[in-house]
Image: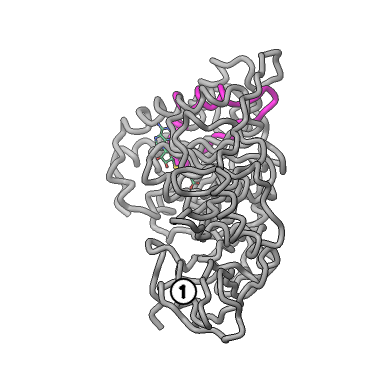
Amino acid sequence: MQLPEAFIQKYSKLLGEEAPAFFHAFDEQPTKGFRLNPLKTHVEPLNHAIDDPVSYCQFGYYGSVSGKTIDHQSGLIYSQEPSAMYVGEVAHPKPGDRVLDLCAAPGGKTTHLASYMNQQGLLVSNEINRKRAEILAENVERFGLQNTIVTNESPDTLEKHFVNFFDVVVVDAPCSGEGMFRKDHEAMQYWTPEYPLSCANRQKKILQSALQMLKPGGRLIYSTCTFAPEEDEQNIAWLLKNYADLKIVPIKKYPGMSDGRPEWADNNSELAKTLRIFPHKMRGEGHFIAQLEKQINDSNRKEPKLQKTNVTKQQKQDWHKVADKLLTNSIEDSRLLVFGDYLYAMPANLPDLTKLQVIRPGINLGVFKKNRFEPALPLALAFKPVNFQKPVQISEEQWQKYVHGDTFTITKDVENGWHVLTNHELTIGFGKVVNGVVKNFYPKKLRFEIKN
Ligand SMILES: C[S@@+](CC[C@H](N)C(=O)[O-])C[C@H]1O[C@@H](n2cnc3c(N)ncnc32)[C@H](O)[C@@H]1O
């Protein structure tokens, strides 16, 4: 790969003897990987081998993902570059925690963080870019997350709503993406010698907001997929100088992982506790990770007002008419929230969202049409087959028709009405059965064709 000349000069100087091996790694194939979704691992993948685990990630495997498979469509797997998997592993929130993923699209870290939370607590997954936030919401829904809301805010707006609120904040920062060069050659086109510094300034602003939202005793996980010291050790050095209440928490280093480089910042030896993944030392594209803790102080912590349900009597009736026949356990009415024509189930104890741009305030349960309610795909994906009454098992051939948007026939003894469709013990979506024909409600924008 033809790396920019200034890049070669910079890293020759920084890495010395190690530099040739580092540059050589850019000519190797990128490393691919995926994580299994523990919310759905009552079954093994159908279409992907899990014989090459990533040693440092509980859910991670090496291998590439095919999107047009039951594994992917059902949310059983999520494609993620292996070194990025260590960010979620370091963050490792507990069920019940309040967690913020501040720069979240397309959702690699969010889905990973949720994997430890077992649908409990609250995960706020935020993305500043609207289009990317919509893709993030799609991935959150595919993964079946019940405790996650997706917001589309700038960090400085978000910070006003969640002061000292979160147990864990992840800042997977927009960066100069030097670790992406091998995977995405275009990333190199943006690179100039000045680019890392301009990214570092933007990252400092994001970090300032992140710290406002972190509660005393909480942890901040900062990561980038770049090698640039300006965005990595130098930003952490800046934090330590400017925030007396922050301390670095060491990160466990697996074979091949490297210490952060104090000499690439202000020589503060604490910076060695941060972590670097280099592509010439491990099977991965490269990452920088730092973990910091906000010391306990006596700052005032005011609990925010909670979001109240706003569903009308008629809407409640329309929802229950469908839900009572579809679900084995009901969703509490106090969690129902209407946004436009859509009905959502909020996570428990959700703070008031009135002034925020919200893409998804919880599970999208469905849409109110004139005098009726139509269940939506995310409701099917958020639960297991056992959580639905009378699930209908479909074959792989029927699944292919379903994801293509076609109607298909099933045995005539299946009752008319809404049914969750399953394959291989995984929920796939909803179909409306009318006299042995399954009407297709798979969202148009997600449809795809399998060419045999
Ligand atoms: C490295 S990507 C995040 C990847 C994501 N965490 C994942 O694992 O899938 C950084 C994200 O930050 C967003 N971003 C860009 N400028 C931002 C800003 N000023 N504040 C917050 N986020 C920003 C980008 O749109 C991008 O989606």
* Residue assigned mark 1: 439
The image quadrant of residue 306 is top right
Residue 359's x, y, as percent?
A: 46, 43
Residue 2 visible in the displayed image: yes
Q: Which residue is painted at 62% across and 49% down in the image? A: 146
The magenta segment is 205-231
Residue 442's x, y, as percent?
A: 45, 66
The image quadrant of residue 74 is bottom right
Looking at the rendered image, the quarter that the N terminus falls into is bottom left
Q: Which residue is painted at 44% across and 37% down in the image? A: 152
| Neighbour tally class for label 1: few under 14, some 14-19, many 20 plus, Cα within 10 Å | some
Q: Which residue is painted at 39% across and 70% down in the image? A: 448
Give the quarter the ligand 1 occupies: top left
User: Vertically, is 403 above or below 172?
Assistant: below
Q: Is residue 223 magenta?
A: yes
Q: Which residue is painted at 61% across and 70% down in the image? A: 45
Nearer to us in this view, 203 or 150:
150
Q: Is residue 216 magenta?
A: yes
